[in-house]
Image (cartoon, helix red, strand yellow):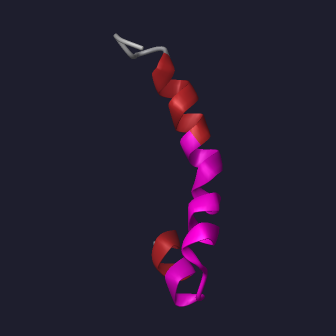
Amino acid sequence: REFKEQIIAGKTEEEIRRSWEPGLTNYKKMRKKYLLYK
């Protein structure tokens, strides 16, 4: 939903990608302890 709103608002690809960074960083930290391989 947020993605669609960003597109409608005319955000650039770079702006949209930057808006994902905090969530991706948190996800990577959370999943790290469950990975079997590095």
17, above or below 36, in the image: below
Foreground pick, 15 / 34: 15
| Direction left: furthest residue | 36
**Magenta stretch in the rendered image:** 6-24
4, above or below 15, in the image: below
Q: Quadrant of the N terminus?
A: bottom left
Q: Quadrant of residue 38?
A: top left
| Direction top: furthest residue | 36
Residue 31 at x, y percent in the picture: 46, 25
16, above or below 35, in the image: below
* Residue positioned 51% across, 82% down in the render: 7
33 vs 35, left or right, is right
6, above or below 32, in the image: below
Residue 34 at x, y percent in the picture: 41, 16
* Residue positioned 63% across, 61% down in the render: 19
Residue 23 at x, y percent in the picture: 58, 47
Question: Number of labelled discs?
Answer: 0
Examine the structure image and report whether residue 21 is included in the region drawn in magenta. yes
32 vs 14, left or right, is left
Main SS, magenta region, reads helix
* Residue positioned 49% across, 71% down in the render: 3
